[in-house]
Structure formats: structure tokens, C-alpha cells
Amino acid sequence: MKALFTSLLAVLCMTILILGNLHWNDKTISAVDNTGTTPKEETKEPASEKLTDLSKEQLLSLADNWPEESKSLLSMAYDEERPFKIAAAGSEVISSKWADIIEEKIQGSFGDMVAFTAKGYPETSAEFVEEGLAAEISSEKPDMVILEPFTLNDNGMVVIEESLENITSIIKEVKQDNPSVVFVLQPPYPLYNANFYPVQVDALKVYAEDNGFVYLDHWAAWPDYRTEDIKKYMVKDLSEPDEEGYELWAGFVGDYLVNN
């Protein structure tokens, strides 16, 4: 009898062990997926922010005044989801309030689809070329360059013919690194009752036309430089534009860059 009881107890213990093991295996299996690996929490890539909510057609409509090459580059930039880069360069006033007004207009219309930078220099065109400063423009990797080619800085310092040659050198150097870049030329601001300076500006306009560059003739928006009316847009010593003058100048260029 005692032997029978011992045998039954052994069978009962064995049954409990087997059932316990089966229960443990069932819990373990339920904790893994069908491939036998523990499920991992899925990590979602953050959605990239769109540069603009505008369609390509809307962007190209805003850029309707641009050269055809620039519009093609803008279309390509849109497809590649990268900003189209505009770099302005010239005398020191280019990086002043003028640039702030232009940037605000571009951002307000194109959003982040068009990036704008501006660099101003005190050098003449000859010094700019000699010091290799065109490399600073190239480093921005621009799609478009709005160049105010130091015409006023050159006044009385560099003869017209050399000044125009320097423009060619600057453009060639930038295009070596950025073959597709498009140049747009503009004169500096007008000066009251100037004599030789307007001759330099006329030569710049002819240079642009002869070489197929867009020329932003913002002088047409100012009062005649030979009249007292222009003083309303200049600082007291008449050496540069006042706030209204910069707004007039930047407004003309901004209306070219953003077709409303």
C-alpha cells in the first residue's frame, strides 16, 4: 500500500512538472513573433518639412520675369526639393537695408523655396579681381547672381574699359565653379547732379545688352538725378540713399524677382 501511494505521488509530481513546463513554453512562444524574434517597436522616419506649399506652376508664375535658364533651374530645384539660391554682390550698400527688403519680399512670396544672400565690398572692381574675391560668390553655390559691379567704387579709380573687363573676369571665375549660374546686372544708386558717373553707368548698360545679360535699370524708377527731386531719396550729404531711397531701389528689384 505504501509503495502504491509512493508511486501515485511520483506520477502526480511528474504531471505537475510537465504541465508547468508546457505553460511556460506557451507564454514564451506568445512573446515572440512568427519568425521567432521579439517584435520591435517600429520607428517612423520624421516627415521632411516642405520648402513651400506652392505648386511648381505657382512658383514659375512668381518667377515669370526671370531669364528662361533661371526658370528651368527653379523647376529643377523644386523637383529635387532644394532651395533655389540667389546671391547679390556689389558695393557695401548691397548688404545694407537694401538686402533686408529684398529678402523679406522673397521669403514672403517663395517661402523657403528661394534662398537669398547678399555680400557687399568696399573694393574697386580691380581690387576685387586681384584679391580673388569672386571665390566668395562661388562658395555660395548660387543659381542666380545679382551683380552690382562696383561701378561707383570704380568712379575716379578705374577707367571704364578696365571696369568692364573686370566684370567679365568676375563672371568667368564664378562660372568656372558654377557653369549653370545666371548673372543679372544692375547699376549702383544714382548721385545728385553727377558728371562722369552717369557715363560709367551708361557703359554698364550697353555692356549688359551686348553680352545678353538682364539689366535691372532701377535708375528709371528714381527722379532725374539732375533735378532737386532726387534729394528726397538721399541722406543729407547726398552720398547714398536714405530709407525711402533704399525702399525705392529694392522695390524695383523686388518687383523683378517676384512677379505679382
Image: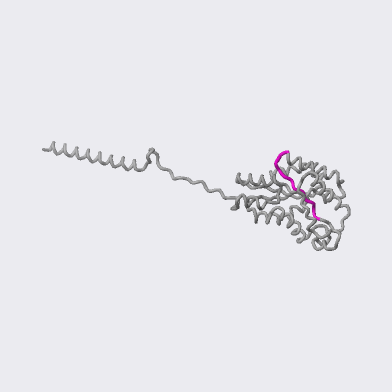
Location of residue 98 in the rendering, given as x and y in whole percent from the top left corner: 74, 56
Q: How is the image coloured?
A: one colour
- Residue sitting at 69 percent across and 48 percent down? 86
- Residue sitting at 70 percent across and 46 percent down? 68
Location of residue 89 in the rendering, given as x and y in whole percent from the top left corner: 75, 48
Location of residue 6 in the rendering, given as x and y in whole percent from the top left corner: 16, 38
> Given the current orientation, which residue lies at the most extreme right position?
195
Q: Quadrant of the N terminus?
A: top left
Location of residue 60 in the rendering, given as x and y in whole percent from the top left corner: 65, 50
Does residue 147 appear in the picture of this structure?
Answer: no
Does residue 229 appear in the picture of this structure?
Answer: yes
Relative horizontal placement of residue 245, taking residue 12 as reference (left or right): right
Q: Is residue 234 above or below residue 151?
A: below
Is 177 contained in the magenta span? Answer: yes
Q: Which picture quadrant has residue 135?
A: top right
Report the span colored magenta: 176-189
Query: Who is closer to the viewer here, 26 or 257?
Result: 257
Relative horizontal placement of residue 127, taking residue 65 as reference (left or right): right
Query: Who is closer to the viewer here, 260 or 1?
Result: 260
Q: Quadrant of the C terminus?
A: bottom right
- Residue sitting at 60 percent across and 51 percent down? 55
The total of numbered circles placed on residues is 0
Relative horizontal placement of residue 24, taking residue 38 as reference (left or right): left
Query: Who is closer to the viewer here, 73 or 99?
Result: 73
Is 153 contained in the magenta span? Answer: no
